[in-house]
Image: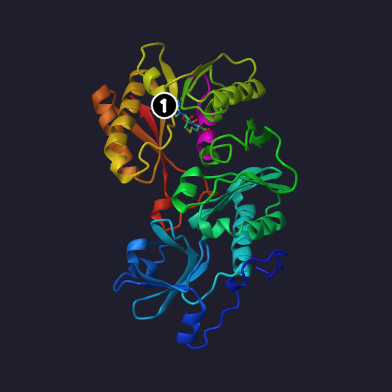
Amino acid sequence: MGAREYHVRIRSQASGMDAAGRMAHRDAVPHVILQPGRDRSVRRRHPWLLSGSVAEVEGDPAPGDLLQVLSAEGEILAHGHYSPRSEIRVRLLCFGKEVPGEEHLGGRIEQSVVRRREAPQLQDREALRLVNAEADDLPGLVVDRYGELAVVRFSTAGMAVRRELISAILSQVSGASSGYERADANAARREGLPIREGPLWGAPPPPTLSIREGKRRYQVDAVSGQKTGFYLDQRDSRDLVEGLAAGRRVLDLFAYTGGFAVAAALGGASSVTLVESSPPAVALARENLALNAADLEAEIVLGDAFRLVRQAGEPFDLIVIDPPPLARRRRDVKRACRAYKDLILHALRRASPDALLLAFACSHHMGADLFRKVAFGASLDAHRPVQVLQALQAPVDHPVSIHHPEGDYLNGLLLGTV
Ligand code: SAH
């Protein structure tokens, strides 16, 4: 990556350190010293340093400052951003002696963008994730591109204090003519950051913008929609649904703005039924169906999918179950398993012979093996044998770092009923 100049400066401590004598160096640079024997995860390149591993913090760092990480014996292991309020005390950006200064950050961001630009699976995609946090070695930074607009989420103090620098970099390398910041309320609470939303560069975004995904067109509300406006992580599964839907009566549970329903409609579904509890999402779903398949018979239900799936009624030939994360924390897993099982069980009761089911769990704590067991339990209880036809996951613009399994959150199953 060539050395670009980004015309915004942040605290000058970020670059140009030399390693002149460890003691002098240690005095100059804020650092954390690990508890004895707590260096294992750092040596395995895990990007999170938990508070329990930290023996001392020296040099009076401010939130977001660059820190050096030293083993109990004084070896320089890594550098990262300081989060004094979070259980994850330091987000590691570089391992060994390399220092993640401004140029480094610019290089990483540019590299993430270039990888997507060159990925064969992403050719002709105008709505995609450009930066996927830890998976792109940029913990705390997510960038989604919707055509001319980049939507940016800073979820750590380290990235939030570098917002101007990152905006300057993105305005040059993202290919988007404007940038908008969306807040991540959970992350802000965890990090003690103010909730901030608003334009970062270029013109402010319109209330809704239009994106194209293959044949599909969607209206996206990037300013007040969920996440950054659209579930880009389900793109490959929408392609799959479009290919499977011909002639089928389709039920899209937890439909948000109709991502799957539109795919089914364009794939030749004979009818689509959507269930979604958020009124603004339902309004956009209605627009999206009208935009793509004005003539199709569509029923859009504003309501509780957990309740509605239990009701008796017409059978469906293709059912999508894509609930919000039901196991945000490890201690929720048992309850989440029951909820997922219930959803799949009741969906199977509404499924016609030879129906297809797509069931998703979007929580790291619900791993692929466990989710398959949940589907197995539902199949037994519903007395409907099922085949696993395909395992489903997020597309290549949502990579997972092998060093950071926590980033692997989306699991899906394409089930065939017999
Ligand atoms: N399938 C969607 C994404 C779904 S995200 C897509 O591909 O775009 C989960 C959705 O479930 C959110 O839109 C949320 O508003 C909705 N939701 C949450 N609880 C719900 C409930 N009890 N009943 C129906 N929808 C619900």
**In the image, residue 263 above or below residue 401:** above
Task: Rate crowding at label 1 as few (under 14), some (14 to 19) or many (20 or more) other CA atoms within 10 Å.
Answer: many
Q: Is-magenta flag for residue 238?
A: yes
Q: Residue at x 52, y 68 (%)?
A: 66
| Whether residue 80 is visible | yes
Q: Quadrant of residue 76?
A: bottom left
In the displayed structure, 124 sits above or below 42; it is above
**Residue for badge 1:** 356
Closer to us: 417 or 61:
61
**Amino acid type, label 1:** Leu
Residue 54 image position (x, y, % from top left): 36, 68
Residue 1 in the image: state x and y as whole percent: 65, 68
Name the residue at 57% across, 13% down. 297
Q: Is residue 211 above or below residue 65?
A: above
User: Residue lying furthest front in this view?
Assistant: 60
Magenta-colored span = 235-249
- Percent across and percent down for residue 224 are 60, 35
351 with respect to 299 (left or right): left
Q: Residue furthest bottom?
A: 21
Q: Nearer the viewer, residue 121 or 99?
A: 99
Residue 213 x/y as whole percent: 63, 36
Answer above or below: position of 119 versus 57.
above
User: In this rendering, does residue 267 appear at all?
Assistant: no
